[in-house]
Amino acid sequence: MLACSFCGKKADAVGALVAGPAVNICDHCIGIAVRVIETRDALERPVSSQPLSGQPLFGQPLSGRSGLERSGWDETGDEALLCEIAVTSELVDKTRDRLQSQIGELRRRGIDWRVIGTALGVSHQIAQERFG
């Protein structure tokens, strides 16, 4: 029986299985791949093309993002989840670097720590300790 090459689930245990030459991928792993690509693309866009605050980062409301809620992990195979945490860790590092760069630019423009702290939802002291 065919199985997903990424998570190992059998064809009868997934919603859909796309078969290719020597590799197969299930609908769940396709969803993970799409999130990885969307996140990578969003992080590589110049700061000026990012959405305004209050809008979802990748064009979808957070409530509709599969994989962000705990329940999706129960159905994720160990190998797929290990792969996903490696990608998530890399994205966290890139996001942290991007945030540091944005705050540095705001400080260069003379924006006060109180304003930055308010935008981040923390006190100006916390903002300055974390990013100063």
Image (cartoon, helix red, strand yellow):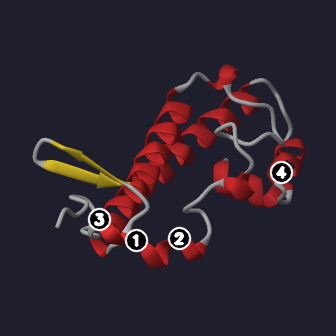
Local secondary structure at mark 4? helix
| Few, some or many residues within 10 Å of mark 3 (<14, 14–19, 20+) | some
Circle number at residue 72? 2
Residue 46, image x and y in percent? 59, 22
Above or below: residue 115 compared with residue 24? above
In the figure, is residue 106 to the left or right of 91? right
Mark 1 and mark 2 in contact? Answer it, CB < 8 Å.
Answer: yes
| Few, some or many residues within 10 Å of mark 1 (<14, 14–19, 20+) | many
Residue 68, image x and y in percent? 60, 63
Mark 2 and mark 3 in contact? Answer it, CB < 8 Å.
Answer: no
Circle number at residue 99? none
| Few, some or many residues within 10 Å of mark 4 (<14, 14–19, 20+) | some
| Few, some or many residues within 10 Å of mark 2 (<14, 14–19, 20+) | few
Which circle's residue, 4 or 1, is located before the other in the chain? 1
Local secondary structure at mark 3? helix
> Which residue type carries mark 3?
Ala
Q: Which residue is mark 4?
A: 117
Which circle's residue, 2 or 4, is located before the other in the chain? 2
Nearest the eye: 71 or 36: 71
Between label 4 and label 1, give the one nearer the viewer: 1
Which circle's residue, 2 or 3, is located before the other in the chain? 3
> Which residue type carries mark 4?
Gly
Q: Which residue is mark 1?
A: 76
